[in-house]
């Protein structure tokens, strides 16, 4: 391509405006330059292309790419959204470049796009034009085109461009311009603007725009009134909502059923249920189950449970049958406020009428009754669940047994019996306790002397899929040892190892301490050796328990040997260890040795109180 042709194409003043049009056609045509110049225009140089048609046809693909890139570099700008269709991109560049406020030149350029006008294209342009004045001009031009009508999305896109999503008011002169072009369009735009403010929760701005809409001589639509009332209800401004409703009725509009339900709900929530009934009358509405349910919900939130029950009876007298949602709201309202006696009555009513609570509500009810100490009714709820076709599961059983057995004090026999019944039902249903409740249940069984049942708990749970941890075995072994049932504890320890659960230092220490207290010192010493062999490091508590046992049995040499072993393993004795040794040697008559140990203890920074041993023992 010759430099002269390229120079004319790029820099001729007469072609500068049409550079964008050339660019778009390069993308959609072959290598010919035919059609690059509008034949209707007469300007200097136009005949040049007509006379040089054959020369133009010989331009290479590389030349076309160079021309397109040159035009692109000189005209393309980055748009805010980063996403823009080709047509929108071309339109935006044209109306910006012409700088005529979408005047004659721009409109002539836009003519080929009239057939392509649709919601997506117009929204795309408005989102990316980044110029309020140009956006309004383009919006007005589009609205005048035959076969096109602005949609809600287009109105919203224009409002976003004008900054109404940033709490900025639209300048009056732009609205006046739209009004002069199409009065009806401005009315719709202002209504959409008010609803947009309401949707964003900006009730104060919505009220200002309502005043401006009226100043322009328009009336809010029914949808706009509905949006306004809703935003003021959500803001807790019931007085303003009432004034808007009065104005709405004066214009002959009615609220939609959803808004009416919300209005009466908010009124009942603040105790104005009589006003709610008057509102329904003014709307000439017949309350249905939804309206009644919303009113009952509001009354429950206001803790007006007597009134809520009265409305339930009012429903029935109006041949409006409460449904499961009504009962759930009433039941949960009473439950949240701790009205458990009323909950029993409501639950019986709803089950009688074939309305069943969800498993989640049953879980909450059972937890509430357990928390209040009414374990008998909590257990009865398990049967009610089954009667409603909702089989009790993992959650409710753990809530019940955990509540009964999870307290520091042991439950009374009758209550523990309920836990045992629930446990038996769990086993039959193949349900397991969690590890915390396994330990707590075993503790309670031990506390009332049911050692055989305690021993079997872990085994029974494992048969239903429970996977015990070392800590679980430790706790149950500890409960058995505390009850002096070292034989059961030993059997459980053996079962633990058969199940490939590795005992830790706490397991061994519990057993060593318990067996020492039972006089089985040799077995305790074997476990200490086993610990050292398996790399399970004993603690000072482990050593001290065995040393104390040797001293009580007057086996001084064994106690001294173990003490030296303890020191050689790097385990520092504490005051209990030293005091046990001093006490043991004194009772054995070896006062000199006791004094040596005392002197050694005085040099140990960890031993602070000689008296501690006697207080602990």
Image (spheres, grey):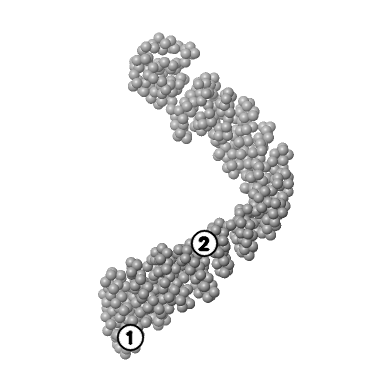
Q: Residue at x 46, y 30 (%)?
A: 85
Q: Quadrant of the C terminus?
A: bottom left
Q: Secondary structure at mark 1?
A: loop
Q: Quadrant of the N terminus?
A: top left
Q: Secondary structure at mark 2?
A: loop
Q: Which mark is residue 392?
A: 2
Q: Residue at x 58, y 28 (%)?
A: 149
- Image coordinates of residue 218 in percent, x first then y, are 67, 33
| Name of the residue lying farthest toward the bottom | 589
**Residue 444 to residue 25: above or below:** below
- Image coordinates of residue 243 in percent, x first then y, are 70, 44
Residue that numbered label 1 is attached to: 553
- Spatial CA distance of label 2 from label 1 is 55 Å
Closer to the camera in the image, 311 or 338: 311
The numbered mark, 2 or 1, whose residue comes first in the sequence reads 2
Classify 10 Å Cα crowding around label 2: few (below 14), some (14-19), many (20 and above): many
Residue 448 seen: yes
**Residue 302 to residue 422: above or below:** above
Q: Residue at x 70, y 50 (%)?
A: 276
Residue 232 seen: no
């Amino acid at each position: 391509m010759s430099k002269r042709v390229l120079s004319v194409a790029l820099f001729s003043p007469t072609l500068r405006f049409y550079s964008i049009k050339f660019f778009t056609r390069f993308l959609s045509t072959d290598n010919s330059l035919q059609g690059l110049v509008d034949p209707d225009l007469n300007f200097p140089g136009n005949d040049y292309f007509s006379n040089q048609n054959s020369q133009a046809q010989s331009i290479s693909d590389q030349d076309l790419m160079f021309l397109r890139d040159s035009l692109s570099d000189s005209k393309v700008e980055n748009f805010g959204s980063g996403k823009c269709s080709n047509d929108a991109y071309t339109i935006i560049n044209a109306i910006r470049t012409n700088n005529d406020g979408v005047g004659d030149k721009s409109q002539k350029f836009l003519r080929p796009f009239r057939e392509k006008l649709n919601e997506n294209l117009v929204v795309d342009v408005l989102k990316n034009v980044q110029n309020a004045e140009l956006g309004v001009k383009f919006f007005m031009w589009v609205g005048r085109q035959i076969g096109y009508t602005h949609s809600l999305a287009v109105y919203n896109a224009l409002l976003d461009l004008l900054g109404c999503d940033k709490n900025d008011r639209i300048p009056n002169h732009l609205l006046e311009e739209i009004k002069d072009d199409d009065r009806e369009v401005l009315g719709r735009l202002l209504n959409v603007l008010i609803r947009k403010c309401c949707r964003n929760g900006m009730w104060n701005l919505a009220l200002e725009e309502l005043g401006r809409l009226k100043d322009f001589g328009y009336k809010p639509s029914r949808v706009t009134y509905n949006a306004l009332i809703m935003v003021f209800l959500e803001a807790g401004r019931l007085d303003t909502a009432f004034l808007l409703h009065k104005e709405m009725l004066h214009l002959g509009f009615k609220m939609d059923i959803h808004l009416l339900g919300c209005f009466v709900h908010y009124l009942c929530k603040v105790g104005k249920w009589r006003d709610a009934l008057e509102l329904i009358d003014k709307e000439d509405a017949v309350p249905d189950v939804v309206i009644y349910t919303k009113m009952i919900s509001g009354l429950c939130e206001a803790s007006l449970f007597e009134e809520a029950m009265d409305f339930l009876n009012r429903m029935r007298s109006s041949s409006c049958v409460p449904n499961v949602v009504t009962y759930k709201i009433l039941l949960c309202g009473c439950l949240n406020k701790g009205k458990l006696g009323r909950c029993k009555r409501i639950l019986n009513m709803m089950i009688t009428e074939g309305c069943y609570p969800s498993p989640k509500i049953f879980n909450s009810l059972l937890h509430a009754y357990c928390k209040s100490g009414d374990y008998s009714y909590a257990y009865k709820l398990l049967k009610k669940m089954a009667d409603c076709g909702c089989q009790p599961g993992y959650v409710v059983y753990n809530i019940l047994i955990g509540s009964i057995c999870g307290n520091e004090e042991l439950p009374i026999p009758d209550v523990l019996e309920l836990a045992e019944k629930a446990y038996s039902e769990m086993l039959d249903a193949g349900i397991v306790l969690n590890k915390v409740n396994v330990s707590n249940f075993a503790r309670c069984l031990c506390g009332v002397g049911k050692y055989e049942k305690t021993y079997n708990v872990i085994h029974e749970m494992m048969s239903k899929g429970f996977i015990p941890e070392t800590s679980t075995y430790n706790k149950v072994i500890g409960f058995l040892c505390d009850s002096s049932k070292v034989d059961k504890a030993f059997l459980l320890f053996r079962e633990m190892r058969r199940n490939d659960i590795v005992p830790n230092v706490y397991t061994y220490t519990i057993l060593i301490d318990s067996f020492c207290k039972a006089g089985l010192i040799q077995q305790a010493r074997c476990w200490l050796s086993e610990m050292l062999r398996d790399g399970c490091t004993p603690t000072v508590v482990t050593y001290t328990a065995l040393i104390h046992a040797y001293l009580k049995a007057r086996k001084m040499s064994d106690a001294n040997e173990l003490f030296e072993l303890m020191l050689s393993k790097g385990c520092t004795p504490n005051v209990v260890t030293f005091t046990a040794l001093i006490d043991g040697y004194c009772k054995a008559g070896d006062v000199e040795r006791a004094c040596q140990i005392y002197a050694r203890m005085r040099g140990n920074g960890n031993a602070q109180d000689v008296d501690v041993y006697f207080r602990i023992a």
